[in-house]
Amino acid sequence: MAELRILTYPDPMLRKKCRPVEEIDGRIKQLVSDMVEAVHDAPGVGLAAPQVGEALRLVVVDLSIGEDPDQLHVLVNPEVEALEGEEIEADEGCLSLPEIFEKITRPERARVRALNLEGREILLDAQGRLARVLQHEIEHLDGKLFLDRLTRVKRELIKRRLKKLAKAAPAL
C-alpha cells in the first residue's frame, strides 16, 4: 500500500493526455486502491490517475467520501458519450488546485461508458453533482483543468494566487 502524493498545479503531468489502460492487472487494482485511499484522505470526491502521476485513463469518484461503499465508482477508460440538460453553474474545486473554488458551468446530465475493475463494461447515466464530478475527472484524462473553463483574466488571477500559495507552503 503506497501512499500517493496528489500533484498540484503547475505540475506538467496535469496537462498530459492519458493513455488507455491495456490490462486490469494487480498493479492497476493496487493503484485504484491507493487512489481511493488518497481521495478519502484528502478529503475529496474524485481523483484521476494523472493527479497522482500516472498517465492512465483511470478515475475514482465517491461523493460520500468513504461513508457509503455503494457510492464509489471506479472507471477504467471512461468516455463521455453524451452531455444533456440545462447548463448549471456551481462551485468547483480540485485537489490539484488547493484552496481554489470557482463557479463553473456544465451540463446537468452525463452518460459515461467505462470498464469496471472486473473488465466489464458499465454505463452511468448521471445527473447533478455526480455528472459534474464525472465531467471534471474525465477532463483530467485529456490534460484539462477547470481553470481552462474560466476567462483568461480570471485564469491569470488564479495562477498568481496559486504561485503565492506554493511559495508559502513548507517544503516536503
Image: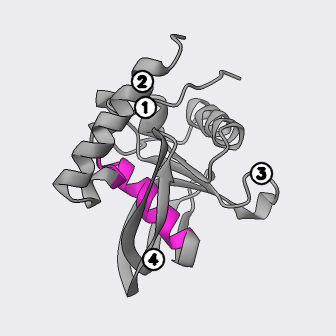
Real-space Cα separation, disc 1 to disc 3, in angstroms: 22 Å
Residue assigned mark 3:
66
Q: Which residues are magenta?
A: 130-146
Three-letter amino acid code at the position of disc 1: Thr
Question: What residue is at 57 percent from the left and 61 percent from the top?
Answer: 120
Q: Nearer the viewer, residue 47 or 121?
A: 47
Cα distance between the residues tagged 3 and 2? 28 Å
Which is in the foreground here, disc 4 or disc 2?
2
The residue indicated by pointer 1 is: 8
Q: Amino acid at mark 4?
A: Arg
Pick whichever of labels 2 and 1 is earlier in the sequence.
Answer: 1
Pointer 1 or 3: first along the chain: 1
- Tell me how far mark 4 sits from mark 3, CA to CA: 23 Å
What residue is pinned by disc 2? 166
Residue 124: say if magenta. Answer: no
Which element is circle 4 on? strand
Q: Residue furthest left?
A: 152
Q: Is residue 135 magenta?
A: yes
Q: Mark 2 and 1 residues: CB-CB less than 8 Å, in contact?
A: yes
Real-space Cα distance between discs 4 and 1? 28 Å
Characterize the local packing of mark 3: few (<14), some (14-19) or many (20 or more) Cα atoms within 10 angstroms.
some
Residue 145, placed above or below residue 83 = above
Q: Secondary structure at mark 3?
A: loop
The quarter in which the N terminus is drawn is top right
